[in-house]
Image: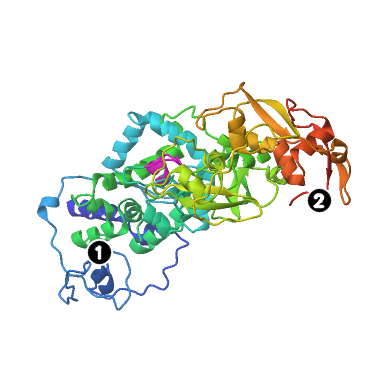
């Protein structure tokens, strides 16, 4: 009777990683040939040479036959393994009382499509999440419904168990911005190299490890590769945490294909030993939270969005306006974006906007998008660079660089920083010799009108000069402004606008032009309207009897005498 019980416990211990029992029913092993008698079941000769390049691993005919619990099939030409003795000092006294729960393939809420084993380790984390870690786990549960539905769809499409979503729960708590001490990022906690291997971009402008959709696709591919290698979801999960080589070498060293057996030795870090029990505990709790006392959780709405294609280096504020949402809402849908604009190296960037708003976006964007072709360069800051030097290098004003990169004149530049350099429209410029700064106008030019401009929140010298159609250096000189003076809302600026020589001629409709009525839109300025229709600010003011103190607002109607607007 005692022997029977012992044999039963051994079979239970190994069954969680027996691919014949717990592998997906959809997985096809028809191309795997039966194993020869007396042939071990772990790695081929080439795999051993790759894992142990400094050791001579020759086939052995006297290796013992594999254990009855080893069911991983191998090709006929697979060679024997070199025998490695288990270090006695690595042994632990961990005891596992196993209770194996069968999966439920009927799609019931509490069914599982990964093997579920309840032992002392799993029970420890079940208790931990209900007590010490209760607040954190409650937050994970609340956030889970936002991401789990579409993550399950991705995993199912890739032919993987849907319950692998609970790896993301213990990795990050479904937080796209989660960042670990080992520099792993995103809901699936990819390190840079592994993310790159599975197609995730990570640079100055974007970090796709934070993109819930793209990172889930990458995680599914990685987990599939791990399962193909180990044919056990517990070992695959451990490999996801520690790296596949770490697990493969451990299996070879201790001659086991059982995750629980592997955790008995000091070889694995505690984090990896705890990884699978945490995943199982998270799955049990999340599938039936009320059973474990998690009541009244306010679950977030499932994530839904539309995707639209936008130009490179497009300001997120403009995209938010066209979608009629806040910039914060836009960033929440696109956590992969690291800067204030879309990547400049992506001509057709796909950005997410709220579900059902694509038609509204396209309608609004057509009228909000900047007129003409925007040109820019990317400058990578080198040691010794200053903002003033960079501006002279590209022969552009400093203020547009500050505005485009959300910088101030006193901002310190770090080596490696990427700066966008705005270049004049319709003309690309190459870096050239240091250019002289534009000469500052002195005195009041003939035929000019002095107006008073009241500064509003968000104004800068560059934006005011653009709106009023004047030189930025002259604007500073007219008002005796120190180059680093900060503009305060409510302050007044003197601006000199050149008058038309003959106002009546300004109202004359030139040949090939027509008079239109333009409705002012959100984000419009006199400068942007003038630029779009190739007219001057002075002409717009004359046509509409505007003086320097008049401001334009959305829904205002302006009379314009124009040809075809710029594309």
Q: x and y percent of residue 420 in the render?
A: 52, 48
Task: Identify the residue position indicated by label 2 in the image.
Answer: 564
Task: Assess disc 2: are there few (<14), some (14-19) or many (≥20) residues with their C-alpha within 10 Å of its C-alpha.
Answer: few
Residue 496 found in image quarter: top right
**Residue that appears at 81% across and 50% down:** 564
Task: Identify the residue position indicated by label 1 in the image.
Answer: 68
**Residue that appears at 32% across and 37% down:** 125
Residue 122 visible in the snapshot: yes
Left or right? Give the position of 57 relative to 437.
Answer: left
* 177 inside magenta stretch: yes
**Scheme by which the image is coloured:** rainbow
Quick one: label 2 or label 1, which is nearer the N terminus?
Answer: 1
Look at the picture and state if 543 lies above or below 34. Answer: above
Kindly check if marks 2 and 1 are in contact, taking CB atoms under 8 A apart as contact: no
**Residue that appears at 16% across and 45% down:** 93
Left or right? Give the position of 432 relative to 227.
Answer: right
Task: Assess disc 1: are there few (<14), some (14-19) or many (≥20) residues with their C-alpha within 10 Å of its C-alpha.
Answer: few
Depth check: give the residue in front, 79 or 340: 340
Residue 459 visible in the snapshot: no
Q: x and y percent of residue 284 in the render?
A: 40, 40
Magenta stretch?
167-179
* 505 inside magenta stretch: no
Depth check: give the residue in front, 323 or 406: 406
Look at the picture and state if 130 lies above or below 352. Answer: above
Q: Which residue extends farthest left?
A: 89
Helix, strand or loop at label 2? It is loop
Q: CA distance from mark 2 to mark 1?
A: 82 Å
Q: x and y percent of residue 27 in the render?
A: 45, 63
Left or right? Give the position of 330 relative to 268.
Answer: right
Depth check: give the residue in front, 464 or 356: 464
Q: x and y percent of residue 548 in the render?
A: 73, 28
């Amino acid at each position: 009777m005692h022997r029977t019980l012992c044999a039963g416990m051994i079979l239970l211990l190994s069954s969680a990683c027996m691919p014949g029992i717990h592998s997906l029913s959809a997985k096809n092993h028809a191309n795997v040939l039966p194993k020869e008698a007396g042939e071990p079941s772990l790695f081929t000769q080439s795999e051993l040479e790759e894992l142990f390049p400094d050791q001579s691993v020759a086939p052995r005919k006297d290796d013992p036959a594999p254990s009855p619990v080893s069911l991983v099939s191998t090709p006929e030409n697979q060679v024997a393994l070199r025998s490695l003795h288990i270090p006695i000092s690595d042994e632990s006294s961990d005891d596992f009382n196993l209770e194996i729960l069968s999966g439920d393939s009927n799609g019931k809420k509490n069914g599982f499509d990964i093997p579920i084993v309840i032992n002392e380790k799993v029970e420890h984390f079940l208790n931990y999440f209900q007590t010490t870690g209760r607040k954190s786990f409650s937050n994970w549960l609340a956030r889970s419904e936002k991401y789990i539905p579409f993550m399950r769809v991705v995993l199912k499409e890739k032919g993987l168990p849907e319950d692998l979503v609970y790896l993301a729960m213990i990795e990050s708590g479904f937080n796209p911005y989660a960042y670990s001490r080992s520099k792993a990022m995103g809901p699936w906690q990819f390190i840079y190299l592994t993310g790159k291997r599975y197609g995730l971009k990570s640079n100055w402008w974007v970090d796709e490890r934070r993109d819930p959709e793209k990172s889930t696709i990458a995680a599914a591919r990685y987990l599939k590769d791990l399962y193909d290698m180990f044919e056990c979801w517990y070992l695959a999960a451990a490999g996801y945490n520690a790296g596949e080589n770490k697990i493969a070498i451990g299996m070879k060293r201790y001659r086991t294909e059982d995750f629980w057996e592997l955790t008995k030795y000091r070889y694995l870090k505690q984090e990896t030993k705890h990884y699978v029990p945490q995943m199982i505990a998270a799955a049990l709790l999340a599938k039936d939270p009320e059973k474990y006392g998690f009541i009244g959780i306010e679950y977030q709405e499932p994530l839904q969005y539309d995707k639209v294609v936008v130009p490179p280096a497009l300001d997120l504020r403009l995209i938010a306006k066209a979608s009629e949402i806040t910039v914060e809402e836009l960033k929440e849908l696109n956590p992969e974006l690291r800067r204030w604009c879309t990547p400049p190296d992506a001509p057709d960037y796909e950005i997410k906007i709220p579900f059902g708003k694509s038609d509204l976006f396209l309608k609004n964007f057509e009228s909000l998008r900047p007129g003409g072709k925007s040109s820019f360069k990317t400058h990578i800051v080198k040691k010794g660079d200053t903002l003033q030097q960079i501006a002279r290098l590209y022969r552009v004003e400093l203020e547009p660089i500050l505005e485009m990169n959300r910088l101030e004149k006193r901002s310190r530049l770090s080596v490696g920083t990427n700066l966008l350099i705005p270049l004049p429209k319709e003309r690309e410029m190459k870096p050239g010799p240091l250019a002289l700064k534009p000469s500052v106008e002195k005195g009041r030019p003939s035929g000019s009108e002095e107006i008073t401009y009241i500064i509003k929140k968000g104004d800068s010298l560059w934006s005011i000069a653009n709106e009023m159609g004047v030189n930025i250096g002259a604007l500073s000189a007219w008002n005796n402004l120190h180059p680093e003076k900060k503009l305060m809302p409510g302050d007044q600026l003197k601006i000199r606008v050149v008058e038309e020589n003959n106002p009546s001629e300004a109202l004359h409709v030139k040949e090939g032009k027509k008079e239109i009525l333009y409705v002012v839109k959100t984000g419009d300025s006199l400068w942007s309207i003038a630029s779009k229709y190739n007219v001057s600010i002075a002409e717009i003011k004359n046509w509409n009897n505007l003086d320097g103190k008049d401001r334009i607002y959305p829904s205002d109607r302006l009379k314009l005498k124009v040809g075809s607007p710029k594309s």
